[in-house]
Image (cartoon, rainbow, N blue to C red):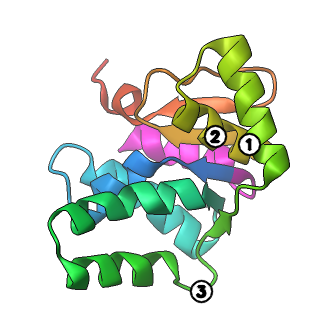
């Protein structure tokens, strides 16, 4: 996992937004992406990076346990997100929704993606970790795609 460790080292001490799919891969123990997701989760837990996400990411992660009507699994997901000193979960206020609408209008992003990106911007994140190729780096924030880190060279 040399590429991942190198990226995490470059992110050290910085605000990093973790997209929903990172949590889903970790919580579902996804065979392809679990180790990569774990590296970012552990970096946030240890304080190497300053981890951020939004209420929308928590809600998206909870969708599967609710779909399965698995109250116990939903409770364990909620406990995971409530872990102290791990992650700053940002609420989506009117300014964040307005910025998301602007991003949707100007960049053509899906609204939920625009909401995640707006939340990361409002939180001052320098990095956005995802596996969604619809996100693109810009002058404000660097997008890190998990699948790109796992490609063999």
Residue visible at 48% across and 63% down in the picture: 58
Badge 3 element? loop
Q: Residues within 10 Å of mark 1 (few under 14, many from 20)?
A: some
Asked if the residues shown at circle 1 and circle 2 are in contact, with their CB atoms under 8 angstroms apart, the answer is: yes
> Tag 2: Cα neighbours inside 10 Å, few (<14), some, or many (≥20)?
many
Q: Is residue 21 left or right of residue 46?
A: left
Residue at which label 2 appears: 115
Residue 68 percent across, percent down from the top left: 14, 66
Q: Quadrant of the image for the C terminus?
A: top left
From the top left corner, tell me how far across and down residue 66 is, in percent: 25, 67
- The quadrant in which the N terminus is found is top left
Residue 9 is covered by the magenta coloring:
yes
Q: Nearer the viewer, mark 3 or mark 1?
A: 1
At a point 81% along the width and 50% down the height, the residue shown is: 94
Of 153 and 48, the residue lying toward us: 48
Pick whichever of labels 3 and 1 is earlier in the sequence: 3
User: How far apart are the alpha carbons under marks 2 and 3?
Assistant: 24 Å
Q: Is residue 122 visible?
A: no
Out of 63 and 80, give the one closest to the viewer.
63
**108 to 90, vertically: above or below:** above
Q: Is residue 13 left or right of residue 26?
A: right
Q: Nearer the N terminus, badge 2 or badge 3?
A: 3
Which one is closest to the eye, mark 1 or mark 2? 1
Residue at the spot 54% in from the left edge and 54% down from the top edge: 56
Q: Position of residue 64 (x, y in %)?
A: 24, 59
Query: Which residue is identified by label 1?
Result: 97
Residue 102 in percent (x, y) is at 77, 24
Q: Which residues are magenta?
A: 1-15
Q: Which residue is mark 3?
A: 84
Above or below, 89 relative to 120: below
């Amino acid at each position: 996992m040399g590429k991942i460790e190198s990226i995490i080292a470059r992110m050290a001490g910085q605000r990093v937004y973790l997209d929903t799919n990172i949590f889903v891969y970790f919580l579902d123990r996804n065979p392809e992406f679990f180790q990569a997701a774990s590296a970012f989760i552990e970096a946030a837990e240890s304080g190497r990076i300053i981890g951020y996400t939004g209420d929308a990411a928590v809600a998206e992660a909870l969708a599967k346990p609710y779909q399965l009507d698995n109250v116990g699994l939903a409770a364990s997901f909620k406990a995971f997100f409530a872990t102290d000193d791990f992650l700053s979960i940002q609420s989506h206020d009117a300014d964040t929704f307005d910025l998301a609408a602007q991003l949707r209008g100007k960049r053509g992003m899906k609204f939920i993606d625009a909401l995640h990106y707006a939340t990361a911007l409002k939180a001052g994140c320098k990095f956005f970790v995802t596996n969604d190729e619809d996100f693109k780096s810009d002058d404000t924030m660097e997008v890190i795609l998990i699948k790109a880190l796992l490609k063999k060279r």
